[in-house]
């Protein structure tokens, strides 16, 4: 039985959506279970987690900026304060298991939990583990991973290959026809459609590149559903076949409507595209630790399951890549078939099974 669980992490949708999915599955099995989230103050999780119906406490923890700033000098002090707060949170809440999904806050919380001999679990989404999770991997009891060959980062005896959990509502995408999905979203069912997303926060390169080719795509009758992220809301109201918004709430319908997807190569985005078998052009972000998005993308590209477009080439080549893949329905079918091999539809069930084992 699960009675009290802490889930920690956040910063981006790639951490928050799996965390909420895990919490929802726990509540489905154990409706009376008390779940507490611990995130980083001022980050996305402080808004998204309460919206999903869960309690959250924010820590003052921050990461080190890539460029030299005065705020970097405060990082050690914020970390120490966050560890002190995490000690009190864990002492008061008395969790059976603590789960870390990545992000600044999870480092402090899992460090304290493992030091207090509380069973802890990391849900590592990427094919290349970051420094924090590699360090925590020596302390936690279990590590749920989405890619094989993670023994180079973690103790082999702690690893369980589960896949990444995706939002439960995305499973509904497979029951929607492309025609019905396009009609629901206000698109022409008979014209090709591209779904473009840079993740929950948006992606500067993708948005700038799309801005340059939006009119050309519009003139060619290629429809675009474009999630710009809240920092890059685009002005496309004058274009007939293009719809842009900061955030797409109904991603199940968005995926179902699309012929192809243009996306960053964050772990959760890759997992979602794989689950739904979508032909994809992946543009890995170069601004992430250890270039892990390129490694995520290459795991697919090497199996003929996706098309890779480097960030530095996006501005000059995105139009050609979209046109070529839209026209080549045979390649779409090949990519779709191969990317489905990476799908882990039961990931959520397996992760919560591991949490149950730790609690018992």
Image: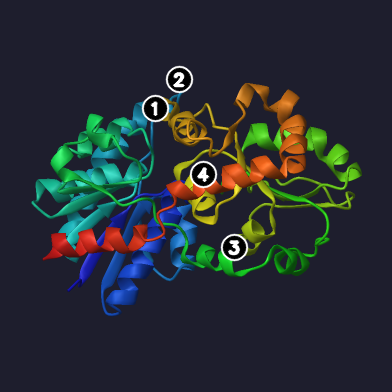
Where does label 2 land, which residue? 68
> Quick check: marks 3 and 4 in contact, CB under 8 Å?
no
Which tag is nearer the camera, tag 2 or tag 3? 3
> Is residue 179 found left or right of 46 in the rendered image?
right
Depth order, front residue of 71/151: 151
Q: Is residue 3 above or below residue 300?
A: below
> Quick check: marks 4 and 1 in contact, CB under 8 Å?
no
Residue 198 in sight from this viewpoint: no
Residue 252's tag is: 3
Q: Marks 4/2: CA distance?
A: 43 Å
> Quick check: marks 2 and 3 in contact, CB under 8 Å?
no
Q: Marks 4/1: CA distance?
A: 43 Å
Q: Marks 3/4: CA distance?
A: 21 Å
Which tag is nearer the camera, tag 3 or tag 1? 3
Where does label 4 land, which residue? 338
Residue 9 x %, y %: 35, 49
Q: Marks 2/3: CA distance?
A: 41 Å
> Quick check: marks 2 and 1 in contact, CB under 8 Å?
yes
Element at label 4: helix
- Which of marks 4 and 3 precedes in the sequence? 3
Query: In the image as oriented, which residue stretches furthest toward the bottom?
Result: 32
Residue 108 x %, y %: 25, 44
Residue 251 x %, y %: 60, 60
Where does label 1 land, which residue? 72
């Amino acid at each position: 039985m699960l009675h009290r669980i802490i889930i920690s992490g956040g910063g981006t949708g790639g951490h928050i959506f799996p965390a909420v999915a895990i919490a929802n599955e726990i509540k489905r099995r154990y409706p009376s279970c008390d779940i507490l989230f611990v995130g980083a103050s001022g980050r996305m999780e402080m808004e998204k987690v309460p919206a999903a119906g869960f309690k959250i406490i924010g820590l003052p923890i921050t990461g080190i900026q890539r460029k030299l700033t005065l705020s970097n000098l405060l990082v050690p002090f914020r970390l120490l304060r966050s560890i002190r707060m995490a000690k009190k949170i864990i002492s008061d809440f008395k969790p059976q298991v603590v789960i870390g999904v990545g992000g600044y806050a999870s480092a402090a919380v899992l460090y304290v939990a493992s030091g207090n001999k509380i069973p802890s679990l990391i849900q590592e989404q990427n094919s290349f583990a970051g420094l924090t999770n590699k360090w925590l991997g020596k302390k936690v009891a279990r590590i749920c991973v989405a890619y094989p060959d993670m023994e180079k980062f973690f103790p082999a005896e702690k690893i369980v290959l589960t896949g990444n959990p995706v939002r439960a509502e995305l499973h509904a995408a497979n029951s929607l026809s492309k025609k019905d999905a396009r009609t629901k979203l206000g698109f022409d069912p008979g014209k090709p459609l591209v779904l473009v997303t840079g993740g929950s926060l948006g992606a500067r390169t993708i948005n700038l590149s799309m801005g340059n080719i939006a009119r050309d795509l519009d003139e060619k009758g290629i429809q675009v559903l474009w999630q710009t992220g809240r920092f890059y809301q685009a002005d496309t109201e004058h274009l007939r076949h293009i719809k842009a918004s900061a955030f797409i709430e109904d991603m199940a319908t968005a995926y179902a409507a699309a012929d192809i997807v243009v996306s960053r190569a964050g772990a959760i985005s890759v997992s979602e595209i794989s689950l739904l078998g979508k032909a994809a052009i992946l543009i890995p972000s170069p601004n992430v630790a250890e270039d892990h998005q390129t490694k995520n993308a290459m795991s697919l590209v090497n199996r003929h399951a996706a098309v890779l477009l480097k960030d530095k080439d996006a501005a000059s080549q995105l139009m050609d890549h979209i046109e070529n893949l839209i026209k080549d329905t045979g390649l779409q079918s090949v990519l779709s078939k191969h990317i489905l091999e990476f799908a882990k539809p039961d990931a959520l069930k397996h992760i919560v099974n591991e949490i149950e084992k730790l609690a018992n």
